[in-house]
Amino acid sequence: MEKRQEILLGQMRTYRMELLQLAKSFTEEEADIIPQGFRNNVRWNLGHVFLDQYLWIQALTKEEAPIPNEFKDWFSYGTTPADFTDNTPAFTDLISLLQAQPDQIFERYADRMDEEYQAIDMGMETIEQVLVRTIFHEGMHLQAVLDIKKALNNKK
């Protein structure tokens, strides 16, 4: 693995741990609360981050990604917790999936990180470029979870 890819994996792990540490500060019940003024809850944000990363890789490579059944119904852009069913993964299950994802991505794609594909949105042509985009996206959802935490703390 090239040095820049090692750095990218380190960044993915670091930012993911920040999100997971914050997520673990919520109880299962709190993770399902949608504070006034919000569209989604913590559980939705976690599922969305997991799904988004794989969807972008899949869009680029045109290969099936390891996305569990129904994740698109629950966590795609435009969905809300109102779309959840009895089968929607529990908060703790999403934490486990997110913990494993960075290493799973690198195990699967490490030897193809800079392989060029047909360009997709924003001119992205490599998995490495897609991962930079998904790290940024994850940061946006980290902020959303921080905002939910603040809103819930203000209600206490």
Image (cartoon, helix red, strand yellow):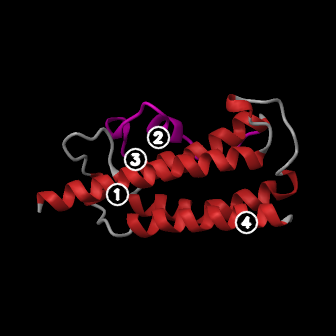
Residue 77 visible from this viewpoint: yes
Query: Which amino acid, by three-letter code, is at mark 2?
Result: Phe
x and y, in percent, of residue 14 in the image: 58, 68
Return the residue at label 1: 146
The three-letter code of the residue at mark 1 reads: Leu
* Mark 4 → mark 2, Cα distance in angstroms: 28 Å
Which residue is labeled 3 in the image? 44
Q: Residue at x 77, y 67 (%)?
A: 6
Give the magenta range.
63-89
Residue positioned 70% across, 34% down in the render: 59
- Are there few (<14), some (14-19), or many (20+) residues within 10 Å of tag 3? many
The residue nearer to you, when weighing 67 against 52, is 52
Q: Secondary structure at mark 2?
A: helix
Q: Please, what is the three-letter code of the amino acid marked with disc 4?
A: Ile
How far separated are the C-alphas under marks 4 and 3? Answer: 28 Å
Q: Are marks 3 and 1 in contact (CB under 8 Å)?
A: no
Identify the main secondary structure in magenta. Answer: loop
* Sequence-first tag of 3 and 1: 3
Question: Which numbered mark, 4 or 3, is in the foreground of this view?
Answer: 4
Q: Tell me where residue 96 appears, x and y as whole percent.
A: 52, 65
Q: Which residue sits furthest left?
A: 156
Q: Are marks 1 and 2 in contact (CB under 8 Å)?
A: no
The local crowd at label 2, few if under 14, some if 14 to 19, many if 20 or more residues have their Cα within 10 Å, is: many
Vertical placement of residue 110 versus 131, above or below: below
> What numbered label is drawn on residue 77?
none
Numbered mark located on residue 75 in the image: 2
